[in-house]
């Protein structure tokens, strides 16, 4: 057994030892290296990819020595090394691209660098160039020079990209447009209509093909294609039209029996209680109470107010409605839509008169 092991070790060259040692070091250091070069997003995938390539390189060297420099196996190991350094080099270059052209923001009490139009465009360019160089290098290592010279391999890749461009090109272009327009940056609260549902969400990350949002109503992560996000007609609630803040409103259907002064006084009393007990709106601006619509059965009243804590938008509406409801009960002003209320009374009277 010792003789076999000694013979096996004797077949190792200095280059084999160097490759194995370097791969082991990079395998162990994959996590801190990826932490340094990348944001937290998608970190586990990058670490796993780097370690899998390191493991395959080590296995390739061992198998190559065991089979006594089998040609194809040796070339495959060299190709794996090229692929590893292509992946590592792309991350390394993109790190400095984000440092130079990215945007620094504070998130969870720490500095983070998010992509901008310039950093995303340069990152895509770097990835494309490195990928082409890696493919050409692997083809030359494997001895496929005739295929390369005929343009076959590169042509096949180009044909594949051309046939599938409808699936990925609109999202990449839309992502670049979103970043360039700065319409929806990370941390902004946006509102859009998706398949009939009104979504209020915070932008978490704008990626190459999609944007990840945090749904403020259901507290879950939402993935939207970049092209779809532009089609939805997105509203950015974090970008105020004035220094007052975001102008929001609440709507109430109230019976014609109550005068304008009664309704306005009731709502103002409710906001006095809100300002006394809560710190949710810009109190220096008086709530605006006005008639929005005069329907057949009720008057639609609108209450406008200003807020700056946009991420609490839904909570603020719920709190304000509860205060106005409580004050309406004290003021004997019903918030029920009169037409619905009348229909219920008629239905009950009809049921009592016709018990069958």
Image (tube, helix red, strand yellow):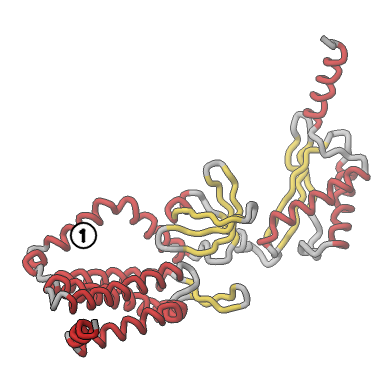
Frontmost residue, 343 versus 177: 343
184 sits to left or right of 299:
left
**In the image, what residue occupies the spot 34% across and 68% down?**
124
Q: Is residue 9 above or below residue 322?
A: below
Could you tell me residue 211's position as x and y percent? 48, 59
Q: Where is residue 152, by image quadrant? A: bottom left
x 74%, y 53%: residue: 317
Q: Is residue 78 left or right of residue 103?
A: left
Q: Which residue is mark 1?
A: 157
Labels in figure, total: 1
Locate the C terminus by quadrant.
top right
Left or right of 103 on screen, residue 340: right
Q: Please rate how many residues cluster around mark 1, counting C-alpha atoms within 10 Å: few if below 14, some from 14 to 19, many from 20.
A: few
Q: Position of residue 147 (x, y in %)?
A: 9, 64
Q: Is residue 186 visible?
A: yes
x 25%, y 77%: residue: 81
Q: Is residue 265 above or below residue 65?
A: above
């Amino acid at each position: 057994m010792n003789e076999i092991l000694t013979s096996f070790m004797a077949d190792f060259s200095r280059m084999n030892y160097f490759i194995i040692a370097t791969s082991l070091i990079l395998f162990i250091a994959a996590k801190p290296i990826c932490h340094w070069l990348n944001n937290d997003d998608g970190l586990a995938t990058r670490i796993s990819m780097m370690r899998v390539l390191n493991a395959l390189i080590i296995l390739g060297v061992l198998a190559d020595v065991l089979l006594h420099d089998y040609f194809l196996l040796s070339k495959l190991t060299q190709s794996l090394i090229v692929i590893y350094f292509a992946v590592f080099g792309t991350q390394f270059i993109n790190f400095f691209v984000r440092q130079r052209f990215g945007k620094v923001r504070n998130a969870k009490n720490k500095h983070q660098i998010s992509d901008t139009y310039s950093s995303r465009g340069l990152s895509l360019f770097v990835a494309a160039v490195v990928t082409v160089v890696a493919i050409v290098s692997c083809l030359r290592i494997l001895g496929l020079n005739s295929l390369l010279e005929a343009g076959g391999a590169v042509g096949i890749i180009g044909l594949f990209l051309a046939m599938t461009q409808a699936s990925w090109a609109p999202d990449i272009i839309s992502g670049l447009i979103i970043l360039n327009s700065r319409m929806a940056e990370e941390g902004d609260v946006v509102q859009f209509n998706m398949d009939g549902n009104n979504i209020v969400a915070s932008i978490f990350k704008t990626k190459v093909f999609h944007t990840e949002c945090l749904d403020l109503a259901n507290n879950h992560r939402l993935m939207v294609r970049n092209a779809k996000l532009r089609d939805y007609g997105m509203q950015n609630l974090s970008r105020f039209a004035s220094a007052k803040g975001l102008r929001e409103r609440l709507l109430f259907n109230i019976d014609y029996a109550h005068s304008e002064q009664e309704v306005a006084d009731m709502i103002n009393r409710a906001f006095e209680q809100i300002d006394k007990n809560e710190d949710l709106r810009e109190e220096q601006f008086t709530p605006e109470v006005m008639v929005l619509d005069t329907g057949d059965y009720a008057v639609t009243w609108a209450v406008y107010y200003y807020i700056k804590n946009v991420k609490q938008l839904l909570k603020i509406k719920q709190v304000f409605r509860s205060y106005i409801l409580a004050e309406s009960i004290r003021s004997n002003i019903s918030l029920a839509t009169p037409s619905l209320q009348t229909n219920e009374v008629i239905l009950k009277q009809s049921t009592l008169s016709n018990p069958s």
